[in-house]
Image (spheres, helix red, strand yellow):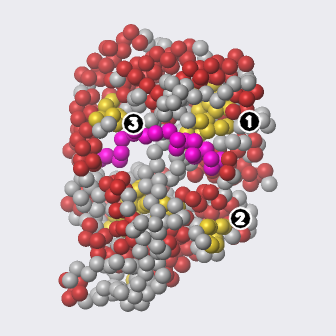
Amino acid sequence: MMKNKKSLSVLCLALAGAMLSTACSSSPSQQSSSAAPSTSGSASVSASSSVPASSSENEAKSDVLDELPLPLTNEKVSLTLWKPWNNDYTPDLNEFAVVKEMEEKTGVHVEYQTVLTSSASEKYGMLLASNDLPDMICHTSNIAYPGGGEKAISDKIYVDMTELVEKYMPNYRKLRLSDEDTRKITVTDSGAIWGIYMLRSNDALEIVPEPSWCGLVIRQDWVKDLGMEMPVTLDDWHEVLTAFKTQKNCEAPLMVTNIGIPKADYFLSAYGVTSEFYNDNGTVKYGPLEEGYRQYLEMAAKWYEEGLIDPNFISNNVSWNAPADYIATGKAGAGTLSWAATADTYVEDGRATDPNLYLAAVQGPVLKKGDVAQSRVTSYCALTPTALTTSCKRPEIAAMWMDFMYTKDGMEANSYGDSSCFTEENGKYSYTDVVMKPSSGLAPQSEQFSHIFGDNLGLVSWQRFDLLNPAERLAAREVYDADGTSLVLPQIELTDAEGLEYNSLYTDIQTMVQEKTAAYVMGTESLDTYDNFIASIKAMNIDRCIELKQAALDRYEAR
């Protein structure tokens, strides 16, 4: 039993902070079946028996689907999809029961060409060089066409799907238009649609961002034991961290990244800036140039000297999750952590050295009570686009198949798996024993990945996590989300030329800023040199980098 609990916790952390061209030869069928149910607003469609005929005469009339027919075709159709994908439990996606169910419903066979996510970038380059492209290509955060999606269209590698979305993708079309941020993210600055984005939703098929998966935590059990209140302001935090150091003999009261600032710019954002480029009411600014950054460094240097910040923050190289060998063993008292590891998770999985350990989510620190921190983990609704390549011989079939992934059936396939895995009643989902008591012996948190289609294409409901985690852990997400995001830039994009110029300038600037920031925190460099530091990065043309970011933000807002 303890083994399963440990597997559960490790899997939860993994969750947080997280996939031969065959000609298509058929016409859309005129049969019908149920598709997406009605949801609030206009962001869903239903199936219908009204299907555009496949004749060239009707195609010339630019028929527009208002409802998606199922099956999509009565003829045998095969498509190929290239997808970065990792699964330790069922290695062949083509053998998933949910894939077979999707084929039965759509009438379209899809052959999945999967590559490991770790090698996806290299494999993608090889794929492009091969001139043997699949019909569809799923992108992930580490895969990008050189020069961007519009360049892929001009290079005649990807298809501009603007017309296909309008004619053959009623579900995706309505969903992307139901949310203004999603609408902006899913088109380029010129209005082209080079990829179909995976969309985060709730179980009701509404575009709703996933709650923050990571945030700030503190040893609440220590705070109570010391008779103190949970910290709110920076002064509160100084008092609590000092007590952790002096009364709990804590080695690293606060864990930070290797530049001396916690992830999501906690503590720093109390001064109204972030560690890099940020949004100041529509104006792009660069944190290290602003007085608030210097003020943070003055505070952090004092805290470091007092032993309140991890003395080994450079070598510990903490990223999003404070390491368990610190935060679960009494060596650390606060840091950033996935919601899935909050509360008494480490007690349950046996890694805690204190049975009373309780890691409570807290909001970001502020200068004075009543303020709200304006930087946190931001979950976007639109991610990982899937492109249609020019190798596809029947793009309208591919477009309708992609649109199927934005129906209720598609959301369930992505989020809950095949029909044997779950039940649904009045919009409420429950896992069956296939997931809850699997024959594999895996914990449910692991077993679910043997059944779901995944997170690269279609609607994906973040509410699936609610079924497998206790309420006290899920509640951490609400605390994380209580902070604001006004300092956070949206998903802006530089043009190809801008990107080349920006990278040629900012790579060296970023390196210098990170090195100097760490040195100022540790006290190995005096803050008396800060004006010279600013002069140096200005001489390296940081102002031009800001101009490029500003231009991208202006274009984004004008979309």
Q: Classify 265 as above or below 305.
A: below
Taking 84 as reference, is 20 left or right? Answer: left
Residue 239 image-quadrant placement? top right
Question: Which range is magenta?
Answer: 473-493
Between marks 3 and 1 in the image, the one whose residue lies nearer the viewer: 3
Mark 3–mark 1 CB contact (< 8 Å): no
Residue 355 percent across, percent down from the top left:
79, 37
Q: Mark 3 and mark 1: span between their CA atoms?
A: 33 Å
Label annotation for residue 357: 1
Whether 477 is among the magenta residues is: yes
**Residue 67, horizontal then vertical, whole percent:** 38, 79
Residue identifier under label 3? 487
Q: Earlier in the sequence, mark 3 or mark 2?
A: 2
Which of pointers 1 and 2 lies earlier in the amino acid sequence?
1
| Residue 75 seen by the camera | no
**What percent of the width, then of the height, locates residue 419?**
60, 75
Residue type at the position of mark 3: Leu
Which of 441 and 175 lies nearest the eye of the viewer?
175
The residue located at (59%, 36%) in the rendering is 362
Identify the residue at horizontal 61%, vertical 17% (top origin).
307
Three-letter residue code for mark 2 = Met
Q: Whole-Å distance between the Cαs marked 1 and 2? A: 27 Å
Instruction: Tell me what residue is drawn at x 29 percent, y 87 percent.
Output: 54
